[in-house]
Image: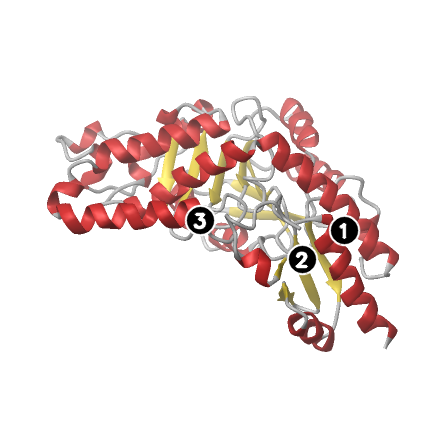
Amino acid sequence: MSTYQNQFPLLTEKLYFNTAATGPMHRDLLEWRRSHDQQYFEQGSRFRETQHDFMDSVRNAVGAFFSCPKERVALVPSFSHGFNVLLDGLAPGQKVLLLKGDYPSVNWPVEDRNLKVCYAEMDAHLEDNILNAVRAERPNILAISLVQYISGIKISLDFLRALKNEFPELLMLADGTQFCGTQAFDFEKSPIDVLGASSYKWMLGGYGNGFMLFKEEAIQKIHPKTIGFNTVHWQYPKESASFVGHFQPGHQDTLSYGSLKKSIEFLKGVGMQKVSERIQVLSRKAKATFEALGLLDEAIVSREQHSSIFTINGSDSLYDHLLNNGVVCSRKGTGIRFSFHFYNTEEELDRLTAILAEYLQD
């Protein structure tokens, strides 16, 4: 039984294996959101007067959590929004390396702009495919998801570090939506130049908030055009705008961004080492279970490192069987996706195994 049932009552009602779709709301966050709106209800326009300082505190919390100075943290309503602003700030005609089949919010914005595009195959040999493509195509930019949203394939950070050493001018843009919140991560020591993420999945921050982290070298190569009064913190002239201000041009939703800050506090309270260790245990057990049942593609079985996202081979009939037995998961193409966070348990995995075995034996 999960020790987090008080924070996540949903866990008592269902086998919730769907964090890759949406992280459930924890009780601490629900109570904070009620308090936030009560203050807005009581204060009206006076509530807005503290917006700038509050948003600054959120940026500070995000920066501290990921080891990035708050001056290089931009708060955005989603990864998609931030990434589009970023791409519009790039010089046209640059060559970008993408992964075939990566998340649409990574690939589509690049493909729809005045940029040259090349691709690497996404399979069991992902890192080799990227290295060969960089050597052959010599792209200016690599834009990828750190964890693939369907297969759960997780790219090696050690590989990215080696790639950066070989190609120091390669601008690395990473979507961390399926990665951030699963382990401690030091952005400053990483090889990644820009890390962006939506926070409603593994960060447990709810909808409408995300962030972009930038290395100083990356800022020199990006010249965003988005602007609004909040870009200069309601001051003149507009030329005084900060770099991250271009990603935050209008009035900001303090409920959404405060939810991100509250969830960071919650994850810190759990302990990111504990979060990471729990996820690794669940990932290893899930992989062994699905492999033993013959439900995993060889591309997943053959990789030593994997996330806690797994898509098994499964029909509509199996998906219905899972739903009828209280399992919350996702239908993805011809497969069924499960994803496990720290609040899931090995006991829950055993129950899932029994439900799958029951169907496969019929």
Nearest the eye: 196 or 216: 196
The kind of residue on which mark 3 rests is Arg
Q: Is residue 255 left or right of residue 12?
A: left
- Which of the two discs, 3 and 2, labels the residue nearer the N terminus? 3
Instruction: List x then y, in percent, for residue 222.
Output: 40, 33
- Give the distance between the C-alpha atoms of the residues marked 2 and 1, in whole angstroms: 9 Å
Note whether residue 124 is visible: no
Q: Residue 338 carries which label?
A: 2
Position of 291 relative to 115 (above/below): below
For marks 3 and 1 on the same chain, the one whose residue lies earlier in the sequence: 3
Give how far apart the Cα atoms at labels 3 and 1 are: 27 Å
357 and 319: which is toward the camera: 357
The type of residue carrying mark 2 is Phe
* Residue at image coords 43%, 23%: 216
Closer to the eye: label 3 or 1 = 3
Residue in front for this viewpoint, 82 or 352: 352
Tag 3 residue: 27
Q: Relative to residue 112, is residue 47 drawn left or right? A: left
Above or below residue 5? Residue 73 is: above
Residue tagged 1 = 286
Instruction: Bin the neighbour count of mark 3 within 10 Å (Cα to Cα): few under 14, some 14-19, many 20 and up.
Output: some
The crowding category of the residue bearing disc 2, from other C-alpha atoms within 10 Å (few below 14, some 14 to 19, many at least 20), is many
On the image, the x and y values in percent for residue 48 come to 17, 42
- Image quadrant in which the C terminus is located: bottom right
Q: Which mark is residue 122?
A: none
The kind of residue tagged 1 is: Ala
Separation of residues labelled 3 and 2 (CA atoms) = 23 Å
Pointer 2 or 1: first along the chain: 1
Q: Quadrant of residue 54?
A: top left
Is 102 on the left or on the right of 121, as rendered? left
Q: Residue placed at 53% from the left, 43% from the top?
A: 175
